């Protein structure tokens, strides 16, 4: 992981046709818990990682509802503390007339 030497490629996605608040929160919960489990699995499977490498692990996920999407990441901030960050919100499809 030092100097971008190792790159793991993975992403979680949840999709809903309509925006419903219960679906929004349930999907977000699934995405966050899935990302946290993935980070824990990486840390457990790779005992040679030092603290800086572990803090640099970021798992992206996308939540799509209707024509709006949110791209986010989950990362570990400290032992047992996970942080989620929304990187981008966008609408699609976009067309020019």
Image (spheres, grey):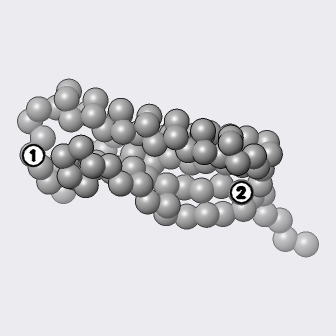
Number of marks = 2
As rendered, which of 78 and 53 lies closer to the eye?
Answer: 78
Residue drawn at x 79%, y 42% as measured from the top left: 17
Judging by the rendered image, the residue that carries numbered circle 1 is: 50
Judging by the rendered image, the residue that carries numbered circle 2 is: 68
Q: Residues within 10 Å of mark 1 (few under 14, many from 20)?
A: few
- Looking at the rendering, which quadrant does residue 48 occupy? top left
Q: Is residue 27 left or right of residue 61?
A: right
Q: Position of residue 96 (x, y in %)?
A: 84, 71
Q: Position of residue 52 (x, y in %)?
A: 14, 54
What whole-number distance in Å separates the C-alpha atoms at marks 2 and 1?
38 Å
Residue drawn at x 91%, y 72% as measured from the top left: 97
Q: Residues within 10 Å of mark 2 (few under 14, many from 20)?
A: some
Q: Are marks 2 and 1 in contact (CB under 8 Å)?
A: no
Q: Which mark is residue 26?
A: none
* Nearest to N terminus: mark 2 or mark 1: 1
Q: Position of residue 82 (x, y in %)?
A: 32, 49
Q: Residue furthest toward the top?
A: 45
User: Against 93, is 11 above or below?
Assistant: above
Q: Position of residue 22 (x, y in %)?
A: 68, 42
Q: Does the rendering let one see residue 3?
A: yes
Q: Secondary structure at mark 1?
A: loop
As rendered, which of 50 and 23 lies closer to the eye?
Answer: 23
Q: Is residue 96 left or right of residue 13?
A: right
As rendered, which of 47 and 40 lies closer to the eye?
Answer: 40
């Amino acid at each position: 992981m030092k100097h971008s030497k190792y790159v793991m490629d993975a992403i979680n996605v949840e999709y809903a046709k309509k925006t419903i608040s219960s679906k929004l929160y349930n999907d977000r919960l699934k995405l966050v818990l899935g990302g946290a489990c993935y980070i824990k699995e990486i840390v457990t499977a790779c005992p040679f990682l030092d603290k800086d490498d572990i803090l640099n692990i970021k798992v992206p996920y996308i939540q799509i509802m209707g024509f709006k999407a949110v791209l986010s990441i989950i990362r570990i901030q400290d032992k047992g503390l996970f942080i989620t960050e929304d990187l981008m919100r966008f609408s699609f499809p976009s067309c020019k007339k």
